[in-house]
Structure formats: structure tokens, C-alpha cells
Amino acid sequence: MRNIILFIRRFFVLFIFLLLQVLSIAILVKYNRTYEAAFANNANEIIGRIDKQYNKVHEYFTLKKTNEQLAQQNRELLNLLKSEYGGADTASFFKIDSLLRDTLGRVQRFHFLEARVVNNSVNEENNYITISRGAKQGVKKDMGVLGANGVVGRVILVSDNYSVIMSMLNRNSKISARLKNDTASNSSVDWDGRNPSYVTLHNVSKSAKVKKGDTAVTSNFSTTFPQGLMVGTVYDIATDPSSNFYVLRLKTAANFYNLQYVYLIENTQWTEQHALEAQIPKNER
Amino acid sequence: MSSLLKNIIRFVLFILVQAFVLNKVPALHHFVKPWLYFLFILWLPFSLPRLAVLTVAFIFGLSMDYFMGTPGLHAAPCVLIAYLRPFVLNLLLPQEKTEFSYAEPSIKSLGFTPYLVYVLLLTLIHNAYLIFIEWMQFGDFLYFIGKVGGTTVISVLLIFITEMLFPRKARYRTNAA
């Protein structure tokens, strides 16, 4: 017994070192697996507040570009206004009431919320974005996130007043997408961790006619995004000799360097769809 | 200024500079990533007990992690270099002296070449371990070697620029003090 105590006392520092190492690796593994480690949520609030202060300063540097993007987006939205379309208006007046149903009785499936970016990274292997809008302001986990020009990512952590978004520039990110003129393939977008301006589109069938500059949009199979949102444009076409698919490099539509405002997309039928799909019996999957 | 107060200010400054200046610099290449924050651990005073160095490094690494959104990723390498620090210092400090005449490791207290070796060795270990943990998720050996090389060169460069920009007053400790 005495020898054991002597042994422990002799190598006490080594033991503490090993303990701390195991502790940090354990935190890392737990966090990476679930994204819901309890302490990440607490820290989120404090760090979010510091990030917000920093962002107040940083915002000025990208103000001009942000304004241009907003103006451009405004122009696009104005073009979509009903009143801009000519022709005889035989339908009754267009109105969106508080129930969010249109005149044909269709329920709006996707709701949009705007949010301010308070922290954003592009240089990491796994990039995350923090926004100053949280559970109290209607953010839920797994909401899609849209930038001024294109898809940005997906909400993974929500605290009371802040949320963390897994950016499209993340090794774990996978977004269902397709080429605009090729409705046959169900492909997906991920990031190889190299250049923040380019992502990779996998599983595009070789039968599709692909040209440089083609547009990739979110697919109709995505539950987080409405279909047809801009993801990027084809920059480089490579064929995978071992399979029947193209590997396409896309230039991202969203500019991740100066994100200031993003739009959160809520799918009102998300819960229903996932609950139904979870009910598929095991032997019929 | 007392050593404790000085180190608390350094703790905050290093984290803020890393989180809000160096991490916001647009990357030249995905191999080149400026890491400087661990210089805080290299600058801790000699007189701190080994156990305290380990604990401080762990807390420091974890605070860094909160800003990066990756709990544990920076804490592990920080603890590792904090553990190895006394061994490296033992090798490099002049052997004939029985006690340290300076408060903390610097060019003045160690001499230029030993200090360079000290910085280079611990930077290499820190970056290699950090990238190794990152790399476990996606194996690409060329990426590992390239990134360790690239980041180490940038880190050492930054450390010596910091040394030149902010010369620390390394006072000679006398018995009278």
C-alpha cells in the first residue's frame, strides 16, 4: 500500500497530465458526436455576447458590400411583386392574412426569419456561424439558413438568444442539391476543407449535360430548404472513372467572407414528415 | 506590475488577439494558419509549479476553444506543451547555475539559440498534435505533413515578430529583491 502511494506521489504530475489529456479528448469526442454537449450551450450565451460587441466594430468594414448585396436582393424581390406583372387581373385580390394562407387555401410551407451574424469563420476545417437570434425569437434546430445570394448552412445549436449554424464550409455538412437543368439526379454538396469559395457536388449522373457556369440549386428532396434556392455555379467538371457520376466543383453563390445578415428558413411540416418517416417498419426499409 | 496581474492580462490579450485578429485574417492557403495564442504558455514564469502550469494551460486552451466553437481541440495540445515545457527547459538552461536568474523564458534569459530551439520544438509539438487531432477525422497524409510545416513556420515567425514588437523587460533577479 505504501509503495502505491509513493508511486502515485512520484508520478503525480504525469497522472494529472494524462487526466487532463483524456478530459479534453473526451470533451472533443462528445461534442463532435452530438453537437449538444451541455456546456456548449452555456458558453454560447457568454461568447455570443462578446462576439456581438466585436461585430459592432467589424460591421463597418463590410458595410459597402453588404449594402450592395441588399440592394441587389431588393431589386430581385421587387421584380417578383405581383403589381409588376401586366395583363388583365382576373383573379381576386392577392392578400396574405395572419394565417399565412394564400387565396387558394394553400398553407405557406416555409417561413423566413432574418438574423444578424455576430461571428463567422472561413479559415477552419469546420466552420461555424453564430447569429444573434435564439429559441426565444423562434429559432429551432435544423432550420435551413440562406444568405443574401445563396444557401449558407443549417442550424445545429440553439440557446436562448443565440444560435450556431453549421456553415456549408464544414466537413460534416451535407446539403441535398441538383443541377437546375437536370432534375434526374439526386446529388449532394459537401466541402473538401480547402478553398472557402468552392464546394463539391457529388452524384451527378454522367447522362446529364453539364457545362461550366451551370447553376446548382437545392433539390426537392431537401426538408430544410425549399427547392430551387441557389447553391452555386459549376466551375470545374471532373469525371470519376470508377463510377457513373461526375464530380463537380461549384463556386458558392453565397459570399462567406462578408456575411452580415442571413435568413432562417422554417419548414412548418418538418416534424410531421420526419415523424411519418420514422414510422416505416424496420423490415420494409 | 506583479507577475500574476501581468499574466492575467496576457491571458486575455492572447485569446482576444487569436480569436478576433489572427483567425479573421483571410487564409493564403489552407496549409497556412497563424497560431500564436500558445505563446502565453511558453512565457509563463519559471517559478510556477508544474501542476499549476498544467492547470493554467488547460483552462487557457478551453477558453480558446469556446471562441473557436470546438471544445477540447485546443485544450489537449496546450496541456501537452505545458507538460513538456519543464523537460525542454531543463535541457536548455545553463547547467552550472543552481537557480534561475530571470523570471521567465526569453531571448535574454536563455540566449538566442536555446530560445529558438525552445520555441521551435514546442511550436512543432503543439501544431503537430493539434493538426493530428483534426486529421483523425479525415485521413490525408500529405495534408498533415504540409499543414504542420506551414503552420510551424508561420507560428515561429509570428512569435519572433511579437518578441521584437513587445520587448519584455527581463529584469535580473537579485537576492535583495
Image (tube, rainbow, N blue to C red):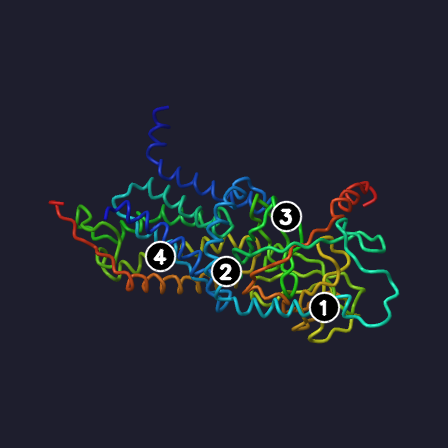
Left or right, B36 with respect to A49, comes to: left
* Mark 2, secondary structure of its residue: helix
Which circle, 3 or 2, is nearer the viewer?
Answer: 3
Q: Mark 1 and mark 2, same subunit?
A: no
Q: Mark 1 and mark 4, same subunit?
A: no
Q: Mark 4 and mark 3, same subunit?
A: no
Q: CA distance from mark 1 to mark 4?
A: 44 Å
* Mark 1, secondary structure of its residue: strand
Q: Which residue is mark 1?
A: A246
Q: Which residue is mark 4?
A: B121
Sequence-wise, the earlier of marks 3 and 1 is 3
Q: Which residue is mark 3?
A: A139
Sequence-wise, the earlier of marks 2 and 4 is 4
Q: CA distance from mark 4 to mark 3?
A: 46 Å
* Residue shown at the point (46%, 62%) measured from the top left: B33
Kind of residue at badge 1: Tyr
* Mark 3, secondary structure of its residue: loop
Q: Chain of mark 4?
A: B
Q: Which residue is mark 2?
A: B144
Which circle, 4 or 3, is nearer the viewer?
Answer: 3
Are the residues tagged 3 and 1 within 8 Å (C-beta)?
no
Left or right, B140 with respect to B127, comes to: right
